[in-house]
C-alpha cells in the first residue's frame, strides 16, 4: 500500500517512509491511497485487540520493510485493554475506556505503535533519531513513555513552564535516560515554534536526525482506528445493531480514526465530535465556512485547538462542510456545561469523568430524544480523571484513586531543564 499527500497525490510513499517523514514534503498529511475491503473478514467480538490490529493493519504495511514485523508491533502497542463498559443496563449507552495505558490517555495507543515501528525502522549503525515534541499536556507524556529507553532513539519534550497542571508536569518530567524534558519560558505556541524552527535549521539538521511524533504522523492515527473496530463489533454482538460514537475532539486525530474504521467496514453508524469552547469545527459544519482562530484555554485543555490539523485529512474524504456534515456532526460544550456534567453524572451514576470525557457525556445528553433512544451510543473516555484531579475532585467532593501506572510515574524523580523560548537556548542544552 502507498500513502499519498492530502495536497498532491504525486507524493506517494510506503508505510515506513510515511511514518519516518511525519509530514509530506509539500506540507500535506499522508493518507492511505485505498481502503482495503473485506479487511474485517473472520474478525468477531472475541478477537483480541492486538490480533485484530495485526490483521487489519497488515494491508497498509504490505510491500514495506515493516510488514513482517506487524504482528510484533501490534502486540507491543496493544498490550493493555480498551474495555467497553455499559453505563445503562439495556446496552443503549456504554463507555469505551481508552485510559488503561502507561500515561492513562488514549494517546498511549498511537504513541506506542509509532515507537514500536520507528525503533524497527532505525538501523543500529545510524546516528540516533531525535524526536521533538511540543506539548500542552497529554501528547508529551505518552510519547516520552512510549520511547523511554528505546535504543537508537532520543526524545526532547518541550512544554510551557507553569502552564500545564501539576499532575501533567509530573508526567512530562519523570523520565530521564533518553528523554530530555524542557520547561520553556513561554507559551505552547512558543514550544511549537521552536520545534518548527529546529526542523528548518540547517545546523540542527546536521547535528541531529530529527523526527516528529505529533498527531500529523499517520503512525499515530491508523492504530487508533483499531479500538473503534473492536468496540463496534462488541456493540453489534450485544445489540444486533451498529455503534454510534461520541468523541471528545481537538486536533481531530481520534475522530479521523473513527471515520477510517467505518471506511474499513466496521459497524459504525453516527459519529459525533464533542468539542470544547473552541468552536472551529462545529461552526464550520453549521455555517459552511471555515474560520480558523487562535485557541482559547478551557478545562478540557487537550482539546484547546483553533486550527485542527487533521481537518485536512477529513476534507480529503469529504471536501466541503456539507459533505463532512453528512459523515459526522459536531457540538461545542463550554466550561460551565463541563463542570455541571461532571457533578451531575457523579451524582446520578457514580461515574467520574475527566473534563474531556465530560464534554462527550454532555453531547449525549443534548441529543434529540429520538436519536438518543434509537441508537447504541458509546462515549469515548479519552483520559482517566486522576490526570485532571485538580479540576475534578472539587466538583465531585471526594478524592480520586490514582491508577497504578500513574502512581508509579509520580514516584520517579523529576528531571527537567528550563530554557528561554529561543532556538539557541534549546540547541545549547540539547544532548547530542
Ligand atoms: C488529545 C486529547 C483529546 C483530543 O484528541 P484529538 O485527536 O486531538 O482530537 C481529547 N481528550 C484527551 C484526554 C486528549 O489527550
Image (cartoon, grey):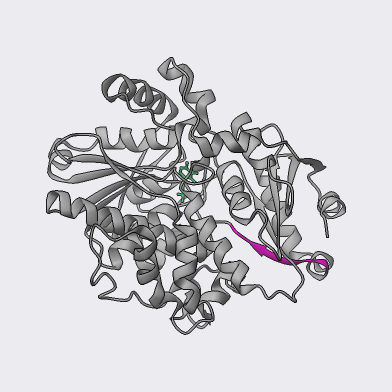
Spot occupied by residue 283 in the image (x, y as percentages of width and height)? 38, 45
Position of residue 324 relative to residue 19, above or below, is: above
**Quarter occupied by the C terminus:** bottom right
Is 212 one of the magenta-colored residues?
A: yes
Left or right of 69 on screen, residue 144:
right
Residue closer to the observer: 259 or 146: 146
Residue 157 appears anywhere in the view: yes
Residue at image location 43% in from the left, 14% down from the top: 397
Left or right of 18 on screen, residue 48:
left
Position of residue 179 relative to residue 405, above or below, is: below
Spot occupied by residue 141 in the image (x, y as percentages of width and height)? 60, 45
Q: How many marks?
A: 0
Is 34 one of the magenta-colored residues?
A: no
Left or right of 87 on screen, residue 334:
right
**Quarter occupied by the N terminus:** bottom left
Spot occupied by residue 114 in the image (x, y as percentages of width and height)? 55, 62
Residue at image location 69% in from the left, 31% down from the top: 162
Spot occupied by residue 34 in the image (x, y as percentages of width and height)? 36, 77
Residue at image location 32% in from the left, 76% down from the top: 36
Residue closer to the observer: 403 or 118: 403
Magenta residues, as a range?
Answer: 207-213
Residue sitting farthest toward the top: 397
Residue 27 appears anywhere in the view: no
Amino acid at each position: 500500500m502507498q500513502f499519498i499527500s492530502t495536497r498532491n497525490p504525486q507524493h506517494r510513499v510506503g508505510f515506513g517512509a510515511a511514518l519516518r517523514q511525519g509530514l509530506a514534503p509539500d506540507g500535506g498529511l499522508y493518507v492511505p491511497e485505498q481502503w482495503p475491503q473485506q479487511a474485517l473478514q473472520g474478525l468477531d467480538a472475541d478477537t483480541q485487540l492486538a490480533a485484530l490490529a495485526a490483521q487489519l493493519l497488515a494491508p497498509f504495511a504490505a510491500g514495506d520493510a515493516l510488514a513482517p514485523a506487524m504482528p510484533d508491533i501490534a502486540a507491543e502497542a496493544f498490550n493493555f485493554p480498551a474495555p467497553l463498559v455499559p453505563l445503562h443496563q439495556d446496552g443503549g449507552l456504554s463507555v469505551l475506556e481508552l485510559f488503561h495505558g502507561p500515561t492513562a490517555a488514549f494517546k498511549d495507543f498511537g504513541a506506542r505503535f509509532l515507537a514500536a515501528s520507528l525503533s524497527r525502522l532505525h538501523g543500529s549503525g545510524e546516528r540516533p533519531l531525535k524526536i521533538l515534541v511540543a506539548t500542552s499536556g497529554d501528547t508529551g507524556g505518552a510519547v516520552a513513555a512510549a520511547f523511554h529507553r528505546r535504543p537508537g532513539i532520543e526524545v526532547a519534550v518541550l512544554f510551557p513552564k507553569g502552564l500545564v497542571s501539576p499532575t501533567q508536569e509530573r508526567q512530562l518530567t519523570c523520565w530521564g535516560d533518553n528523554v530530555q524534558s524542557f520547561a520553556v519560558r513561554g507559551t505552547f505556541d512558543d514550544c511549537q515554534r521552536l520545534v518548527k524552527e529546529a526542523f528548518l535549521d540547517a545546523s540542527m539538521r546536521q547535528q541531529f536526525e530529527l523526527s516528529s511524533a505529533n498527531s500529523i504522523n499517520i503512525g499515530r492515527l491508523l492504530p487508533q482506528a483499531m479500538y473503534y473496530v473492536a468496540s463496534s463489533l462488541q456493540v453489534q454482538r450485544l445489540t444486533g445493531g451498529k455503534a454510534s460514537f461520541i468523541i471528545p475532539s481537538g486536533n481531530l486525530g481520534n475522530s479521523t480514526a473513527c471515520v477510517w474504521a467505518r471506511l474499513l467496514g466496521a459497524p459504525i453508524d453516527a459519529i459525533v465530535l464533542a468539542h470544547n469552547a473552541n468552536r472551529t469545527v462545529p461552526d464550520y459544519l453549521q455555517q459552511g465556512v471555515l474560520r480558523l482562530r487562535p485557541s482559547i484555554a478551557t478545562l478540557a485543555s487537550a482539546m484547546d485547538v483553533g486550527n485542527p490539523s487533521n481537518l485536512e485529512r477529513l476534507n480529503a474524504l469529504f471536501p466541503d462542510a456539507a459533505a463532512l456534515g453528512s459523515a459526522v456532526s459536531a457540538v461545542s460544550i463550554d466550561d460551565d456545561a463541563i463542570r455541571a456534567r461532571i457533578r451531575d453524572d457523579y451524582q446520578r451514576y457514580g461515574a467520574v469523568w475527566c473534563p474531556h470525557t465530560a464534554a462527550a457525556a454532555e453531547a449525549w445528553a443534548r441529543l434529540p430524544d429520538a436519536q438518543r433512544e434509537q441508537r447504541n451510543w458509546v462515549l469515548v473516555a479519552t483520559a482517566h480523571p486522576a490526570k485532571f484531579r485538580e479540576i475534578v475532585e472539587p466538583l465531585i467532593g471526594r478524592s480520586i484513586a490514582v491508577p497504578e501506572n500513574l502512581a508509579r510515574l509520580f514516584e520517579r524523580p523529576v528531571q527537567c531543564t528550563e530554557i528561554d523560548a529561543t532556538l539557541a537556548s534549546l540547541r545549547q542544552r540539547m544532548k547530542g
